[in-house]
Amino acid sequence: MNIYCVTQVLMIFMIAWYTTIFSVCGDDWMQEPCRSCDEKEQDLGGCRCQAYMLAGDMNAADPVCSKSPHHQKILDARAAAEHSGADTPITFRNERNSRVFARG
């Protein structure tokens, strides 16, 4: 296993661990708009992995949520995919593709 894979595994473990801890420790860690959202008890601020990957902060609101300040990234990606005009094949995740995705 190379260092890149080890780093990914550790990051996933840390995010999962923190998500578990945060879910039992209340909502003090949440940022706005999650902290004052009436749905926070149900979705716990959304996905920490998506927040980290798209907003650069695992405590940020999940960008998939329409209330997130980073939601425009989701809308832009969907618009680009819908208007590409090409039938792009599905890219399955593997070590090589993960490195390409990580570089952006």
Image: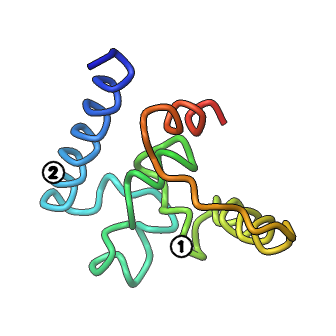
Q: Indicate the position of residue 42 as horizontal and vertical percent values.
A: 29, 81
Q: Indicate the position of residue 75 as horizontal and vertical percent values.
A: 72, 70
Please state, as top left, top right, bottom left or bottom right, where the C terminus lies in the image: top right
Q: What's the residue type where badge 1 is placed? A: Cys
Callout 2: 10 Å neighbours few (<14), some, many (20+)?
Answer: few
Q: Residue at x 43, y 73 (%)?
A: 36
Q: Can you tell which quarter of the image residue 14 is in?
A: top left
Q: Name the side, left or right, on which 91 lies relative to 20.
A: right
Q: Name the side, left or right, on which 72 lies relative to 21.
A: right
Residue projecting furthest to the top: 3
Q: Residue at x 64, y 59 (%)?
A: 70
Question: Of the numbered discs in the image, which one, if any, rests on residue 21?
Answer: 2
* 41 vs 3: above or below: below
Q: Indicate the position of residue 79 as horizontal and vertical percent values.
A: 79, 71
Question: Of the numbered discs in the image, which one, if any, rests on residue 86?
Answer: none
Question: Of the numbered discs in the image, which one, if any, rests on residue 65?
Answer: 1
Q: Nearer the viewer, residue 28 or 74?
A: 74
Q: Nearer the viewer, residue 100 or 20?
A: 100
